[in-house]
């Protein structure tokens, strides 16, 4: 009887993992979950942090999870959120994965990871965090959030228009605050981190009133609030824009979508009755960025995040921020591999993007100075879209909070494929922090260890092992120094032409 009593106490007490067949059992605020034991770490996959956003909950703020009886298996990830191109049509997708050390220690720093994918693709399950957990001694939570038209639709009169994906992220952070201790984490030491759209999400959450107090440090990887682009520079089919849209534009786009379905006065109800696949198909290739950009001028984002940064209206938490040396090469790989970019095409891109200033850009980035015209284009886009806005964002952050900057410059790490000069492309650093199935090859172990140590130290202390901004650390094999981003990426030139 004593043995039975002790087992019952262990299972009922939050924060005390209990051994069981196939893995530890942990009690969350909605019920018990059974994870999977690995060598040195545990995973708890497919834990719901909000109710399924289906039926009448489609395009509503995330709602509480219904408690479940017994022990819920947590051995497989939840479905990816519905997305194009046709990889998932699941609406019941608000799940997260916890990866934690097995040694029984408590009050570890927690990293909450937001995946990239342009607010329209990706999932938390794409990132295996076990190396970061085992070597770094942190708890990592990877999160799914609503994407595309299901995450960012707006309509007149629809509360939360254009912000449902960001609201999901905040719901996940509230789940972490309530449940981190059960997995050995410290709810008072949470770092919100992400790359690309995930990094932009982190920057947005720094400026969002609803996220205040939910995290204590921030890591922004290739996702500055200031990222924007002129027409045709990002890709020939992408017009001028940024990662954010005014809420009126988002609502207007939503009204246009409703009209394509023949919806009348009750546009919200009508669209809620449409199949997910029909909604995805209706937004395929529309070029309407309002379906994949969070809306500002809302309760979640009162103003454009770049404006908020410039005003100093953001959370005063330490920030680790950086990008990659050849950020834009990967975005042009498909174009160049299908049909190599010519010098004439490069000149046409500059004319479309910069008009009367194209000659000045061409003189600063002459095609003859690069191995191919595509790499000249990539250099222009890297500097104009990513590196210089990122540097400007770091300057704004550093005015008011501790900021640590880096540039990932390793050109010989894992890449999506061979046969293309990927360099240090957008997302190249991910393979050094996570196991990532879509990047072929093995990261250089010394650099991976150094980066994991730096990320984990920042999560624990809010500091890194390098000097604070304006110093910018170079992260590359065999390199232990700093870089002048202003010079390397011609940022004074870009500032001069606006």
Image (cartoon, rainbow, N blue to C red):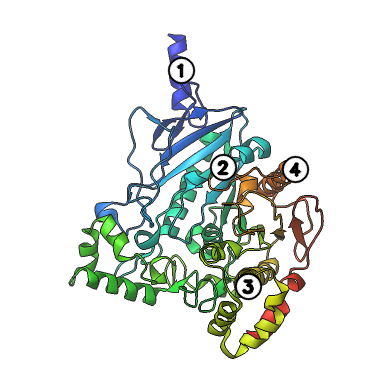
Q: Write down the residue under mark 3.
A: 373
Residue at figure coordinates x 68%, y 37% from the top left: 135
Query: In the image, which is nearer the foreground, mark 4 or mark 2?
Result: 4
Marking on residue 7: 1
Task: Report the Cα–Cα distance between label 4 and label 2.
Answer: 21 Å
Local SS, label 1:
helix
- Residue 469 vs residue 9, the one in the foreground: 469
Residue at the limit of the structure toward the top, as seen here = 1
N-terminal label among 3 and 2: 2
Q: Position of residue 60 (x, y in %)?
A: 32, 58
Q: Write down the residue under mark 2.
A: 140
Local SS, label 3:
helix
N-terminal label among 4 and 1: 1
Query: In the image, which is nearer the foreground, mark 1 or mark 2?
Result: 2
Query: In the image, which is nearer the foreground, mark 4 or mark 1?
Result: 4
N-terminal label among 3 and 4: 3
Question: How many other residues sit within 10 Å of disc 1, few (<14), some (14-19) or many (≥20)?
Answer: few
Location of residue 232 with respect to 459 vertically, above or below? below
Q: Write down the residue under mark 4.
A: 446
Proximity of marks 4 and 1: CB atoms separated by less than 8 Å: no
Q: Position of residue 102 (x, y in %)?
A: 59, 28
Q: Position of residue 416 (x, y in %)?
A: 56, 52
Task: Report the Cα–Cα distance between label 1 and label 2.
Answer: 27 Å
Task: Report the Cα–Cα distance between label 3 and label 2.
Answer: 41 Å
- Residue 397 vs residue 493, the one in the foreground: 493
- Residue 122 vs residue 302, the one in the foreground: 122
Specify whether 9 is left or right of 190. Answer: left
Task: Report the Cα–Cα distance between label 3 and label 1.
Answer: 67 Å
């Amino acid at each position: 009887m004593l043995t039975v009593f002790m087992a019952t106490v262990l299972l009922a007490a939050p924060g005390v993992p209990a051994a069981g067949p196939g893995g530890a059992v942990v009690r969350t605020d909605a019920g018990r979950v059974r994870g999977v034991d690995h060598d040195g770490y545990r995973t708890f996959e497919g834990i719901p942090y909000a109710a399924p956003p289906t039926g009448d909950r489609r395009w509503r703020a995330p709602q509480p999870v219904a408690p479940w009886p017994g022990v819920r298996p947590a051995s497989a990830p939840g479905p990816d959120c519905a997305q194009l191109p046709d990889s998932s049509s699941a609406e019941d997708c608000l799940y997260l994965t916890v990866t934690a050390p097995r040694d029984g220690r408590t009050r570890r720093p927690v990293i909450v990871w937001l995946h990239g994918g342009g607010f329209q693709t990706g999932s938390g399950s794409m990132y295996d965090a076990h190396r970061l957990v085992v070597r770094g001694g942190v708890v990592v939570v990877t999160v799914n959030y609503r994407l595309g038209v299901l995450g960012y639709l707006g309509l007149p009169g629809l509360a939360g228009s254009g912000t449902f994906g960001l609201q999901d992220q905040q719901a996940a952070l509230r789940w972490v605050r309530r449940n981190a201790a059960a997995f050995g984490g410290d709810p008072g030491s949470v770092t919100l981190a992400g790359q690309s759209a995930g990094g932009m999400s982190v920057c947005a959450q720094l400026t969002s009133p609803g996220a205040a107090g939910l995290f204590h440090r921030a890591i922004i990887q290739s996702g500055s609030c200031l990222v924007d682009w002129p027409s045709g520079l990002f890709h020939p089919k992408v017009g001028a824009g940024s990662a954010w849209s005014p809420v009126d534009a988002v609502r207007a786009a939503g009204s246009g979508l409703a009209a394509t379905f023949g919806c009348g006065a009750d546009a919200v109800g009508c669209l809620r009755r449409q199949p997910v696949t029909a909604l995805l198909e209706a937004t395929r290739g529309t070029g309407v960025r309002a379906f994949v950009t969070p809306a500002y001028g809302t309760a979640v984002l009162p103003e454009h995040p770049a404006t908020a940064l410039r005003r100093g209206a953001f959370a005063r938490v330490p920030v680790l921020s950086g990008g990659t040396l050849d950020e834009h090469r990967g975005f042009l790989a498909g174009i160049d591999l299908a049909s190599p970019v010519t010098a004439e095409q490069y000149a046409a891109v500059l004319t479309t993007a910069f008009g009367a200033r194209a000659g000045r850009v061409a003189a600063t980035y002459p095609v003859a100075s690069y191995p191919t015209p595509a790499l000249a284009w990539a250099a222009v886009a890297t500097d104009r879209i990513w590196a210089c806005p990122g540097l400007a964002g770091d300057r704004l952050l550093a005015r008011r909070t501790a900021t640590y900057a880096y540039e990932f410059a390793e050109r010989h790490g894992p890449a999506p494929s061979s046969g293309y000069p990927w360099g240090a492309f957008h997302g190249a650093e991910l393979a050094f922090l996570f196991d990532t199935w879509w990047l072929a090859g093995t990261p250089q172990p010394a650099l991976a260890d150094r980066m994991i140590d730096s990320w984990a130290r920042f999560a624990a202390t809010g500091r890194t092992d390098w000097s604070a901004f304006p110093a910018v650390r170079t992260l590359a094999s065999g390199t232990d120094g700093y870089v002048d981003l202003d010079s390397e990426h011609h940022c004074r030139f870009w500032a001069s032409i606006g």
